[in-house]
Image (spheres, rainbow, N blue to C red):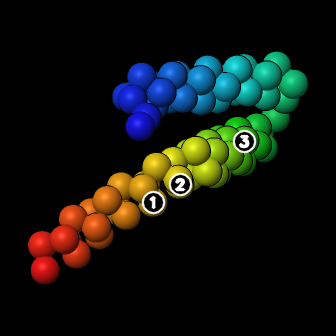
Amino acid sequence: MWSTGVWERLAALSVRLVLGLQTLARRLGAGQAGQSMVEYAIVAALIAVVAMAAVQALGGGIAHVFQNILSKIQGIG
């Protein structure tokens, strides 16, 4: 089962990536009006990637939990 430490590390990594990408975007596009839109697109893409990775990583574990719950419910009846 996944511990909370994994989630903390994943969150810290995503924050570092976002901050690094924002810094890079500022350096590359200093003084441009469309800079914030690029940053929002990068953040949205990063959130999507992290969400997909979390679903893939936790999919089997979540299915196992629901199978355990189902077997206990069936065992009652």
Query: Quick check: 15 left or right of 66?
Result: right
**Mark 2 or mark 3, which has the lower sequence index?**
3
Residue type at mark 1 is Ala
CA–CA distance in space, label 2 to label 1: 6 Å
> How dense is the environment of label 2, judged by Cα within 10 Å: few (below 14), some, or many (20 and up)?
few
Taking depth in this image into account, of 63 and 29 the one nearest to the observer is 63
Quarter containing the C terminus:
bottom left
Taking depth in this image into account, of 47 and 61 the one nearest to the observer is 61
Question: Given contact means CB atoms under 8 Å apart, are the residues at marks 2 and 1 in contact?
Answer: yes
Query: Quick check: 8 left or right of 23?
Result: left
Residue type at mark 2 is Gly
Locate residue 33: give its quadrant: top right
Taking depth in this image into account, of 75 and 39 the one nearest to the observer is 75
Q: Nearer the viewer, mark 1 or mark 3?
A: 1
Q: Which mark is residue 42?
A: 3
> How dense is the environment of label 3, judged by Cα within 10 Å: few (below 14), some, or many (20 and up)?
some
Q: Residue at x 51, y 48 (%)?
A: 58
- Residue furthest toward the bottom? 77
Locate residue 27: give its quadrant: top right
> Which residue does the numbered mark 1 point to in the structure image?
63
**Mark 1 or mark 3, which has the lower sequence index?**
3
Q: Residue at x 84, y 29 (%)?
A: 29
> Which residue does the numbered mark 2 point to in the structure image?
59
The number of discs equals 3
Image spot of residue 38 (x, y percent): 76, 43
**Relative to 77, residue 52 above or below:** above
Q: Secondary structure at mark 2?
A: helix
Q: Which mark is residue 11?
A: none
